[in-house]
Image: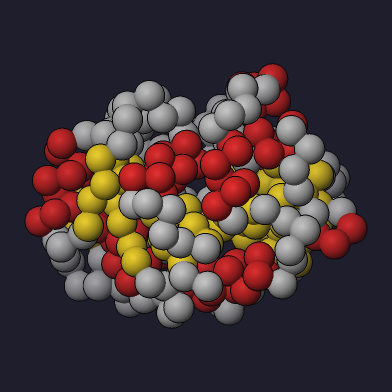
Amino acid sequence: MSVLVVIPARFASTRYPGKPLVELTGAGGVAKSLVQRTWEAAQSVSGVDRVVVATDDDRIRDAAETFGAEVVMTSPQCANGTERCAETLASLGGAAEIVVNLQGDAPLTPPWFIEDLVTGLRAAPEAGVATPVLRCDGATLNALLADRKAGRVGGTTAVFGSGNMGLYFSKEVIPYTNETFAPDADTPVFHHVGVYAYRPDALAAYGTWPVGPLEQLEGLEQLRFLENGHRVLCVEVDARGRSFWELNNPEDVPRIEAMMSEMGMP
C-alpha cells in the first residue's frame, strides 16, 4: 500500500496564532520552526512514499518551501486537519491507499508511532481510521492534571474498549482515578497522540458529515467519526523511554525544548 503523510499547518490557530512558524531550539542551539521539525520527523518514518505540507497561508508555504517541503495549498474553509487531508488527497488525484495526518504541533512524534499506526490499520479492515494512544506514566498524568487545574487545554486522553476501538476522546483527563502514581508508574490513563491514519473512503466521507455536538464541545475532530457510527482504532504505542508532548500553548515551548535537549535532538 502507498502511504501519504500530510502535515496540516494553519496560521490562524485560535489558541496559538502563528504556531507552525514558532521556533524551537534544539540541543545544538539551532532554532527551527515547528512545521520544519514536524516535516523532519516525517522524513524519518520508514515505508512512507510522500510527505506534503498542507496549508492555506502564504507565510507557511514560503517557509516550508525554503526547507525543501512539497506544499499543497488548501481552502481556508477547512475546519480541521482531517478536512485539510481530504482536500489534499483529492488535489493529488487520490493517489494513496493510506493517508497519515501528522499534525504540525507534534515534532517529538517518534517514527515508530507512525509505522505502528499504519501496521495497525492494515491489520484491522473493519476500521476506516486509526490513531495512536500512549499509556501515561505518573509524571505525564500529573502534567495533564496540572494543565487542567491551571485552566489550560493540554493533551487529549482516550478510552477504548473491545478490539481497541475508541469509545471516547476528551480534553479532560479520562477515565477518572483518585489514585496517586509515582512518576515512573503506569496509570490507567492513555494520552491520545495527535496522529491519524485513514483509508481514503473514510477520509472522503468525513467531509460530508456535519459537525456534531461532541466535536463542537470538545474541539476534537476524531469525534465526528464516532458520532457517525464509524470505528476508530486505537493503536497502543510504546514510547521506548522517549519523551513526548504536543505544542498546544505558548507554555509548552520551554517544556518541549527541554525534552529536545534531554534527548540530544539538534
> For the point 65% across and 57% down, which residue is it?
130
* Residue that lies at the very extreme toward the right in this rendered image: 162
**Residue 135 coordinates in the image, percent (x, y):** 70, 62
> For the point 74% across and 32% down, which residue is it?
227
Residue 136 in view here? no
Seen in the picture, residue 231 relative to 67 is either above or below; the reply is: above
Seen in the picture, residue 207 relative to 24 is either above or below; the reply is: above
Q: Is residue 214 left or right of residue 102?
A: right
**Residue 205 coordinates in the image, percent (x, y):** 60, 38
Residue 197 in view here? yes
Q: Nearer the viewer, residue 218 or 140?
A: 218
Q: Quadrant of the C terminus?
A: bottom left
The coloring applied to the image is secondary structure
Q: Is residue 203 left or right of residue 27?
A: right
Please count the marks in the image: 0
Q: Nearer the viewer, residue 256 or 109?
A: 109
> For the point 46% across and 43% down, which residue is it?
86
> For the point 89% across and 58% down, which residue is it?
162
Q: Nearer the viewer, residue 100 or 236?
A: 100
**Residue 147 coordinates in the image, percent (x, y):** 56, 38
